[in-house]
Image (tube, grey):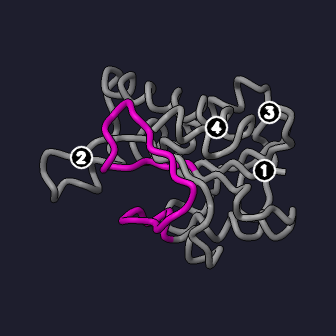
Amino acid sequence: MYLIVGLGNPEPEYSKTRHNMGFDVINKIAKKYEIDITRNKFNGEYGSGIIENQKVILLKPQTFMNLSGQCIKPFADFYKIPVENILVIYDDMDVEVGTIKIRKKGGPGTHNGAKSVVHELVNEDFPRIRVGIGKPVDEYDAIDYVIGPLDEETYKNLEVGIEKAAEATDEFLKNGIDSAMNKYN
């Protein structure tokens, strides 16, 4: 079994913001595979199904970004999912818009959601897909940049990365993290 987690913020005003790239990827995967994300458990919205012959849980933590690990850890424990089968998808300012970066394991960098996941799992060995959102022009504008509303054109540019992350998730489930890294990095 695999736990595929998209990080984001649950309130409607965060919909279609840079910080919700993880949620957007989960929504795209759920739509493609007709998986309803309507159940609630451990402060998360989730649904389960089969993707690439693998049983998966698609999860959107409802704890807000900075506490995402508090939702992921109980899911991993309850369903006895090994850390290498927990794929975490989130936005990254250090990755260009329209591109993704996949890692097998590693530190959380500056991303508070990833820091929470590492803290709660007490482990850095989970695979992750970072969806590029680019950097703000003004460093002091970082918070507004990630949670501010987007115009349609800007969001369309971000959708390229969302699509790549969804495809990379399929590749991960079908052929493993190394194959996904070789194909999409």
Q: Which residue is mark 4?
A: 169
Query: Residue at position x 57%, y 43% from top?
Result: 23
Position above or below: 120 against 100: below
Residue 32, given in percent of the width and then of the height, sits at: 71, 23
Is residue 10 visible to us here?
no
Indicate which label's residue lies in the foreground, 4 or 2: 4
Mark 2 is on which residue type?
A: Lys
Horizontally, is 181 left or right of 35 in the view? left
Q: Quadrant of residue 169?
A: top right
The C terminus lies in quadrant:
top left
Q: CA distance from mark 1 to mark 4?
A: 11 Å
Position above or below: 116 against 85: below
Which of the labelled discs sits on residue 135, or is there none?
Answer: 2
> Quick one: label 2, few (<14), some, or many (20+) residues within 10 Å?
some
Indicate which label's residue lies in the foreground, 2 or 1: 1
- Label 4: which secondary element: helix
Q: Nearer the viewer, residue 9 or 180?
A: 180
Q: Which residue is mark 1?
A: 2
Residue bounds of the magenta highlight: 89-115
Horizontally, is 141 left or right of 90 in the view? left
Query: Residue at position x 62%, y 29% from top?
Result: 28
Query: What is the total number of numbered labels drawn onto the structure image?
Result: 4
Mark 4 is on which residue type?
A: Thr
Q: Looking at the image, do the residues carrying marks 3 and 1 touch, with CB atoms under 8 Å apart?
A: no
Q: Looking at the image, do the residues carrying marks 3 and 4 touch, with CB atoms under 8 Å apart?
A: yes
